[in-house]
Image (tube, coloured by chain):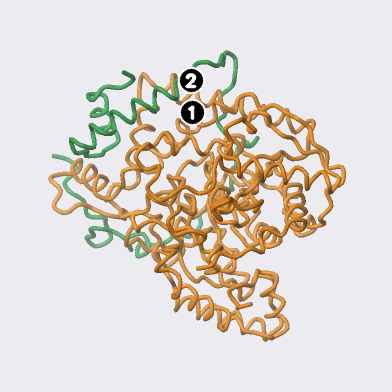
Chain colours: A orange, B green
Amino acid sequence: MELFDLTIHELHDRLKRREVSSVEATKAMLARIEATDATVNAFITVTPDEALKGAEEADKRIAEGSMDILTGIPLALKDIFLTQGVRTTCGSRILENFIPPYDATSWLKLKERGAVLVGKLNQDEFAMGSSSESSAFGPTRNPWNPDCIPGGSSGGSAAAIAARQATATLGTDTGGSIRQPAAHCGCVGLKPTYGRVSRYGVIAYASSLDQVGPVTRDVRDAAIMLGAIAGHDPLDSTSVERPVPDYTKSLTADVKGLKIGLPKEYFISGLDPDVQKAMDLAIETYRGMGAEFVEISLPHTDYAVACYYLIATAEASSNLARYDGVRFGHRSKDPKGLLDMYCKSRAEGFGTEVKRRIMLGTYALSSGYYDAYYLKAQKVRTLIMQDFLKAFGTVDVILTPVTPTPAFRIGEKTSDPLQMYLSDIFTIPTNLAGTCGISVPAGMSRDGLPIGLQLVGRPFGEEEIIRAAHAFEQATQWHILKASL
Amino acid sequence: MKITRQQVENVAVLARLELSDAETEMFTGQMDAILAYVDKLNELDTTGIVPTSHAVPMENAFRADEVRPSMGVENALGNAPGRIEDFFRVPKVIE
């Protein structure tokens, strides 16, 4: 058991008992990154100086007796989180040399508790993608099979956990970007309810869908991280004024009488046989623990992908208008005038997927098409939301697959964007409904690739999905498996 | 045909994106396919449905109208591609 193999709670115990220092743990983590990242490419920027400085400060706090569970823990952040003084690229050439003047609130909260930053993680450019292949810094590889994708857009966050390059990480989820890579990499990924965690300092993709969440080794670590980052932020007017419970109190492993909904629209024939097998086993496991299953219907499921690719692209086209070469980011050399500067800077700085989504979104919002596309999608969104709220009238949590198949090969789906989009079918509805979801390891495919299961909760029902996920994890121990690099 | 090449060129102007010929061709084909797909939303009758403008029930997130320190000129200009004194330098705006 190396220091980089420990979870937050395991490392915390050793730090507290002075068996190991944060500097030792951080050095071990940095060495691990050095030894493995040529293969995995999970990191865009490694921050050894910043990390060791943070670790030294953490060790001082530990010596003074003023530590808490996150003090001295080496973490990494998706490169979508602004980190003051540390380059932040969002996976894009347009921000290749951008040095943020402030910290994201979610990172600041972790930093204030003494967490240590080892680096910034690779992702699909501007969080647009499901495979991390659209990064301007090369694809991240799945530690379980380097020819396969780790998922996306938080591919670096999940791969770093699977490769033991960070004790825990943060990602963001707009259509499944935390849950799907977690499933493909055999780790835990939690998307909180919209508004639960501040989006201040998180580079915006789709403002009504984006959420910050942890990607971790186990459910306990996810509960610890969520507790640290959740809460109202005066700097984010979409964050809610709701008290933050102690999520670790939900780690009871007790699901007796828990009503689990199985949405018939998610359990279609044609599901990959390994995924089907994992789901069947999961249902059996939950039954054995005393949970009850209820068949439910989420009738508008089939419209979610279409709805998402109108709303998300529309919001993205607006959010990415700021990348114009004026105040920050790439500016084209010798522009012929102002308009030329905008058009060339953006053409040179953005990758193809980003351009495609900006184009779609601009079209959907343009005069003459706004009603037919964007407004229509907003109405369908209401129907999707209502499906979930109705379902939670009869069940406590909803169980679904995370992905239709295990991780596909790098390059397999890049020629047909629509095929890639359709693979987000199980995660997108959660974002549209604004509610919470967690992905936990649920098995392995015949080819040795991880498979995840998803629990979706009611809005602000993180405690229930944490409880249900933890119980399953403790009963099956899939999270113990380690990728051999 | 959900979208023509001419429409794609118009959208590119709105989006302030200079596209190559090859890109315009590719995007026309791809957008056509994607727009054909999202057309399925028209299978749903959404008469009387209120569009979702916000994911959680929230209103009027105000703060007190008090002046607070801002990031300062040096921070604000820290990533400026072009700078003159305390200003962002850009190509001529008014001809």
* Residue A202 visible in this rendered orientation of the protein: yes
**CA gap, disc 1 and disc 2:** 7 Å
Dot 1: within a 10 Å radius of its alpha carbon, few (fewer than 14), some, or many (20 or more) residues? many
Residue at 63% x, 33% y is A266
Tell me: A231 left or right of A380.
Answer: right
Front one among A183 and A216:
A183
Whether A63 is drawn above or below A149: the answer is below
Count of numbered circles on the image: 2
Amino acid at pointer 2: Lys
Provide residue A63's location: percent of width, then percent of height. 67, 86
Comparing A165 with A144, the one in front is A144
Q: Quadrant of residue B87?
A: bottom left
Tell which subunit mark 2 falls on.
Answer: B
* Residue A52 vs residue A43, the one in the foreground: A43
To which chain does the residue with label 1 belong?
A: A
Give the SS element for disc 1: helix
Q: Which residue is depicted at the point 46% across and 45% down?
A: A130
Q: Is residue A27 above or below residue A301?
A: below
Q: Which residue matches tag 2?
A: B40
Indicate the quadrant containing the N terminus of chain A: top left, top right, bottom left or bottom right. Answer: bottom right
Q: Which mark is residue A306?
A: 1
Q: Is residue A234 visible?
A: no
Q: Where is residue A47 drawn, in percent x and y?
A: 44, 73
Q: Are marks 1 and 2 in contact (CB under 8 Å)?
A: yes
SS type, badge 2: helix
Kindly identify the amino acid type of the residue bearing the numbered disc 1. Answer: Ala
Are the numbered discs 1 and 2 placed on the same chain, yes or no? no
How far across and down, in percent of the image, does residue A189 sit? 61, 53
The x and y percentages for residue A93 are: 31, 55
